[in-house]
């Protein structure tokens, strides 16, 4: 039985959506054992109004949480029994197999770093993120591709970028059921000699690595096209790109809503385009994917979006369980050793 420690107090929407997501999953055809970590009164206050199967939910008491405005390190030290700390310790001590949180990203990574070990050869962990693309990926026709790092590190060496490529490849194989994901470095040109010294050196090393289907460099224009399955970059650049993609999606939605409200002809045109707009909305809906992994630890860590609703939380738990079931950490370990994952 796979057990997931869920930070019940994290996330912009508070305890309600997190608990509802766990309750929703408990009555699904494929439930997962969830340890809801947080204030028992608050958690029970939500559960009392939900349909759920108590066999699949366990409440683990914790006191307090790390708010989005807190300094994460100071907050974790000040309150060692806050929800994310307790959840991480459950995984460390073998009472759970994976950690999921929609709370403070920095606090999630720091709590994991305090409790878990990095896998052999991993100097720095990476926060990965899914992003919508024009092309479909893998046999399932996944509309998302993976980018890493998007914020766990600022500067990355060639060694780090190579490790990100290995980890991203292993994750895409498992979650997207893609047997040979195409991995590329994000640079300012497709030629092997383009980019920073770290990118150029990483390009040379990835070319020689048998465990990764490395296809070279890609440019920014390739990101929305989805020409590759995994894009590797340092955390500073990845975070800027990710926020830009989220912003473009939200601006498009706002413009469409504004156009619909203003003029009859615009409403008519948008109605005619409704099928295409629904497809675009579906493609850019990160809620269906659930969460993004923090890769490089010896335990599975999934960081759900801060604005996650119940559906997104449910899917984040499912992603975590799938990563455990298919032994993501071992796949990364093998890949870092130069073997085939």
Image (spheres, helix red, strand yellow):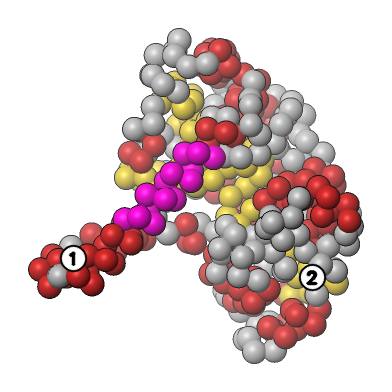
Q: Residue at x 48, y 43 (%)?
A: 242
Q: Residue at x 49, y 61 (%)?
A: 287
Q: Is residue 178 left or right of residue 75?
A: left
List the residue tagged with mark 2.
Answer: 38
Instruction: State yes or no: discs 1 and 2 in contact (Cβ < 8 Å).
Output: no
Outermost residue toward the top in this view? 193
Outermost residue toward the left in this view? 265
Quadrant the C terminus occupies: top right
Q: Is residue 254 left or right of residue 16?
A: left
Q: Which residues are magenta?
A: 239-252
Q: Is residue 275 left or right of residue 218?
A: left
Quadrant the N terminus occupies: bottom right
List the residue tagged with mark 1.
Answer: 270
**Mark 2 or mark 1, which is nearer the start of the sequence?**
2
In the displayed structure, 185 sits above or below 180; it is: above
Report x, y in % for residue 127.
62, 42
Confirm whether the magenta stretch covers residue 70.
Answer: no
Report x, y in % for residue 259.
22, 65
Q: Is residue 178 visible?
A: no
């Amino acid at each position: 039985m796979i057990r997931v420690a869920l930070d019940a107090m994290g996330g912009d929407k508070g305890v309600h959506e997190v608990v509802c997501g766990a309750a929703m999953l408990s009555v699904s055809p494929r439930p997962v054992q969830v340890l809801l970590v947080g204030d028992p009164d608050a958690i029970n206050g939500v559960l009392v109004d939900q349909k759920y199967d108590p066999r699949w939910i366990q409440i683990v008491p914790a006191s307090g949480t790390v708010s989005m405005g807190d300094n994460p390190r100071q907050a974790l030290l000040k309150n060692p029994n806050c929800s994310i700390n307790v959840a991480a310790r459950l995984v460390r001590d073998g009472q759970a197999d994976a950690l999921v949180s929609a709370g403070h990203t920095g606090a999630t990574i720091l709590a994991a770093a305090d409790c878990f070990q990095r896998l052999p050869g991993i100097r720095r962990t990476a926060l990965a993120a899914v992003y919508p693309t024009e092309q479909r990926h893998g046999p399932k026709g996944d509309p998302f591709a993976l980018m890493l790092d998007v914020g766990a590190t600022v500067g990355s060496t060639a060694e780090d970028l190579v490790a990100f490529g290995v980890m991203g490849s292993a994750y895409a194989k498992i979650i997207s059921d893609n047997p040979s994901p195409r991995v590329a470095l994000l640079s300012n040109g497709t030629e092997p000699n383009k980019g920073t010294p770290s990118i150029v050196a990483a390009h040379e090393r990835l070319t020689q690595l048998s465990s990764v289907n490395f296809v070279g460099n890609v440019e920014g224009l390739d990101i929305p096209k989805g020409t590759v399955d995994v894009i590797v970059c340092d955390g500073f650049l990845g975070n800027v790109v990710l926020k830009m993609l989220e912003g473009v999606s939200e601006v498009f939605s706002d413009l469409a809503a504004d156009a619909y409200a203003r003029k009859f002809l615009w409403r008519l045109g948008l109605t005619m385009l409704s099928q295409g707009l629904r497809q675009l909305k579906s493609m850019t809906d990160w809620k269906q994917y659930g969460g993004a992994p923090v890769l490089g630890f010896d335990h599975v860590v999934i960081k759900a979006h801060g604005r996650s609703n119940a559906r997104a939380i449910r899917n984040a738990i499912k992603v975590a369980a799938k990563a455990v079931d298919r032994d993501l950490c071992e796949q990364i370990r093998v890949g870092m050793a130069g073997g085939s994952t």
